[in-house]
Image (cartoon, grey):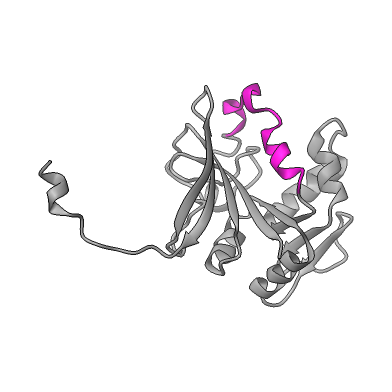
Amino acid sequence: MGTLIVTEFMTLDGVGQSPGAPDEDREDGFPYGGWQAPLESSEYDGVVFEVASRMDALLMGRKTYEIFADYWPVAPEAIPFTGLFNRVPKYVASSTLDEPLSWEGTHVLSGDIAESVGTLKERHDEVHLFGSLNLVQSLLAAGLVDRLHLWQYPIVLGTGKRVFAEGTVPTVMTLSDSKIYGNGLLHLVYEPAGPPTFAREDAEYWDQ
């Protein structure tokens, strides 16, 4: 069985909407698109690609597919992701798209998403997913996410679609790796460890 690895760029308050460009995702009137670029640093150049370069399949939701398909097929070859994304097989979880799709090598997943993605994990060693916030919620709920790379930027927006939105299934996360960069960016790598347990805080702790 392969692994499903999710990469998300998010603010301190958990917003993952439209990090890459002002018009990337205006849903619900989101006014802060493109918040990521001013906070980038050459200090971590290549780290995201190093992780992604091990993928042998790319999974997307419909909106992320539309953003990627508009850019990567004609993106400059000098960008490492250009060759990677155009080369690997791509899968879109959508009930509104029909094949054939404009981005060569892309296929639509139909039917039950959990079943379809489970089949992908049997077929591929590493399936990677970027963004696709609605799809991530479904995959987390189905227990299909094996690892999360969270890039948490030092900015608070107060509005927008969040990586862990209302309705996210309660889950304990094990921190398997972390790094703090000079500009305050956090790279946090988590692996889901199962449902949480709940208890009352020991009163003796507060008496110390």
In the displayed structure image, the side of residue 111 where residue 151 appears, left or right: left
The foreground one among 190 and 26 is: 190
| Residue 189 in the image, given as x and y percentages of width and height | 55, 45
The foreground one among 157 and 50 is: 50
On whether residue 86 falls in the magenta region, the answer is no
| Residue 77 in the image, given as x and y percentages of width and height | 88, 34
Q: In the picture, which quadrant includes the C terminus?
A: top left
What's the residue at 79%, 47% (across, down)?
70
| Residue 25 in the image, given as x and y percentages of width and height | 62, 47
Which segment is the magenta one?
Answer: 36-54
| Residue 183 in the image, given as x and y percentages of width and height | 52, 23
Which residue ends up furthest to the left in the rendered image? 207
What's the residue at 52%, 22% (across, down)?
182
Which residue ends up furthest to the bottom in the rendered image? 111
Q: In the picture, which quadrant includes the N terminus?
A: bottom right
In the displayed structure image, the side of residue 17 where residue 14 appears, left or right: left
What's the residue at 72%, 44% (across, down)?
52
Magenta residues, dominant SS class: helix
The foreground one among 194 and 96 is: 194
> Is the residue 3 above or below the residue 34 in the image?
below
Task: Evaluate whether residue 206 shows in this view.
Answer: yes
On whether residue 51 falls in the magenta region, the answer is yes
In the displayed structure image, the side of residue 26 where residue 58 appears, left or right: right
> Is the residue 139 above or below the residue 68 in the image?
below
Task: Evaluate whether residue 186 shows in this view.
Answer: no
